[in-house]
Amino acid sequence: MNNFLTEQDVKKLKEEIEYRKVFTRKEINEDLKEARAHGDLSENYEYKAAKRERSRNEGRIRYLERMIKTGKIITDTTNPEEVGLGKVITVKFIEDDFTAEYMMVTTVETDAIHNKVSIESPLGKAIYKKKVGDKVTVSSPDGDYTICIEQIVNE
């Protein structure tokens, strides 16, 4: 794992880690304590659920810490007329005659529902640092397709 992260991304990850260590752990430990008080642990669903939740929380903490440790800090060095981080890009899918808008973000901020595309995704890699009017072939797991960059808006 070698994700590209901005300083802001690292700050968000550290905040989530801190929240999970201080608040979520405390909540889960209280749930475990209460579940233990109910007696027989072998048939205690609340106890098993709390242990499962503790495991999920600790796994998420390890994942976030590993992401920070292995991530590569980047800054956007693109010109205003180039596709870069934080910019909204309008692209036209040539074969489908379809137009869509995407915001270029880092892996941490990726959100397909809100059209936030990582610069590490097939589309993101293909259009990063390109300019309006450039036609680009995108290689994806579903096959290659061609797009044309129609607009770049700095957010």
Image (cartoon, rainbow, N blue to C red):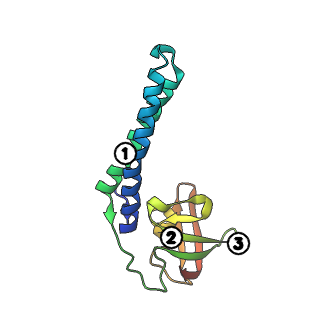
Question: Residues under labels 2 and 3: Cα distance?
Answer: 22 Å
Q: Are marks 3 and 1 in contact (CB under 8 Å)?
A: no
- Looking at the image, is mark 3 or mark 1 nearer the viewer? 1
The answer to which of marks 2 and 3 sits earlier in the sequence is: 3
Pinpoint residue 133: horizontal percent, then vertical percent. Answer: 57, 84
Instruction: Please name the residue shown 58% across and 66% down the image.
Output: 145
Find numbered disc 2 in the image and state the secondary structure of the residue it sits on. strand
Query: Mark 1 = which residue?
Result: 21
Find numbered disc 3 in the image and state the secondary structure of the residue it sits on. loop
Instruction: Please name the residue shown 57% across and 76% down the image.
Output: 89
Query: Mark 2 = which residue?
Result: 104
Pinpoint residue 2: horizontal percent, then vertical percent. Answer: 34, 57
Question: Residues under labels 3 and 1: Cα distance?
Answer: 49 Å
The answer to which of marks 1 and 2 sits earlier in the sequence is: 1
- When the figure is inspected, residue 8 is found, relative to residue 45, above or below; the finding is below
Instruction: Please name the residue shown 45% across and 59% down the image.
Output: 108
Pinpoint residue 80: horizontal percent, then vertical percent. Answer: 47, 86
Q: Is residue 151 left or right of residue 57?
A: right
How many badges with numbers are in the image? 3
Q: Residue furthest right?
A: 97
Most foreground residue, 147 or 86: 86
Query: Mark 3 = which residue?
Result: 97
Pinpoint residue 69: horizontal percent, then vertical percent. Answer: 29, 54
Question: Residues under labels 1 and 2: Cα distance?
Answer: 31 Å
Find numbered disc 1 in the image and state the secondary structure of the residue it sits on. helix
Neighbourhood count class around disc 2 (C-alpha, 10 Å): few under 14, some 14–19, many 20 upward = many
Question: What's under tag 2, amino acid-wise?
Answer: Met
